Image (cartoon, rainbow, N blue to C red):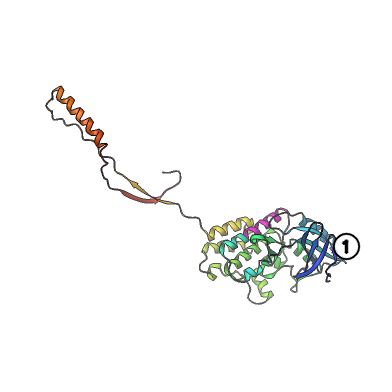
Amino acid sequence: MPIAPGTRLGSYVVEEFVGQGAMGVVYRAYHAQLERTAAVKVLQGLGGDVDSTARFRREAQAIARMRHPNVLNVFDFGEFEGTPYMIVEYVEGGSLSPRVKNGPLDRDAAIAFLRGIGDALDYAHKLGIVHRDVKPANVLLGPDDNPILADFGLAKLMESSSIKSLTGVTTGTPAYMAPEQVTGSHVGPAADRYSLAVMAYEMLTGTLPFEEGGVMEVLYAQVHKEPAPPSMLDHKLPRKVDAVIMRGMSKEPAARWERCHDFVAALENALNPPPAAAERTVAFAPPAPQAPKPSSIPRPKRPAADMTAVMAADEAAGSIRGPDPALPFPVVTWKGTVVPGHS
């Protein structure tokens, strides 16, 4: 149901309608004492029965305990005329979705987004929380384009409620859903990692792995088909990217990357391989010429007075000339790989 501006929800006053998504309606609200603007997400379709209310409170409490720079903060939650709502951090930058829909992203920007989202997911998974609906529309852009993952736990709430998708499968977005979500199997952290790999595919190629046909065709492809390698869609992408993303989108959850961090690190290395071992040019000089050996031919002896004069003259000449200039020598150039620790 719509909430009129001026309605008080706890300590917050609703100011205006912001938008509507698959899981609810969003309003902007203001906390006068804290001088803080927040967003109110009214969750539709959960029902007002005791079980639904208790389930909502448990999920809201778990989400509200999360503290991470890439996770949307939850400030409060409650019910308005039997409909549950959450009061969350207000982010003005909009979602990542329009950026992705405009074509492939810059590689560095894609890695930065994926790293932030992946860090948020790894953090949540350590707490035993699975998102279940990772997609660009659920990524908000904060200051300096910092990605902030929103709607943790809401997919699970919707799945447990009487609201199902039109196809009768578990709640989620078909284009980003893991195969086990489609088949109704156990959904764990690996499903979020699959969705992150789909996002990486879309960011780098400008297209989704499966988007031909309707919803049922996409769901069938998620379970039974393999996507085209990313390098076939963009020939500038290294083929190593194919292996990284295809592992992330493996049909078997156990075959995927164990952590989002590992996936993003491997993808970054595939996109920007580390430079090869440094090559140096080294100049070698031949050994200095040896002084000639004394001649074995006997020389006539000079009188002592003559020898003294010669030594004095030589000493005086040396102080004027200085040392003899070095003899020129050829330079041999060698170009090779220098292995650290072996000079």
Q: Quadrant of residue 327?
A: top left
> Is residue 146 among the parts visible in the rendering?
no
Q: Which residues are magenta?
A: 114-127
In which quadrant will I find the C terminus? top left
Q: Residue 157: x, y in percent?
A: 78, 63
Q: Is residue 119 magenta?
A: yes
Q: Quadrant of residue 39?
A: bottom right
Overall secondary structure of the magenta section: helix
Q: Secondary structure at mark 1?
A: helix
Q: Describe residue 111's horizontal placement relative to residue 139 as left or right.
A: left
Q: Residue 250: x, y in percent?
A: 62, 63
Q: Amino acid at mark 1?
A: Val
Q: Residue 69: x, y in percent?
A: 69, 55
Residue designated by label 1:
50
Q: Residue 150: x, y in percent?
A: 72, 62
Which residue sits at x=21%, y=35%?
Answer: 292
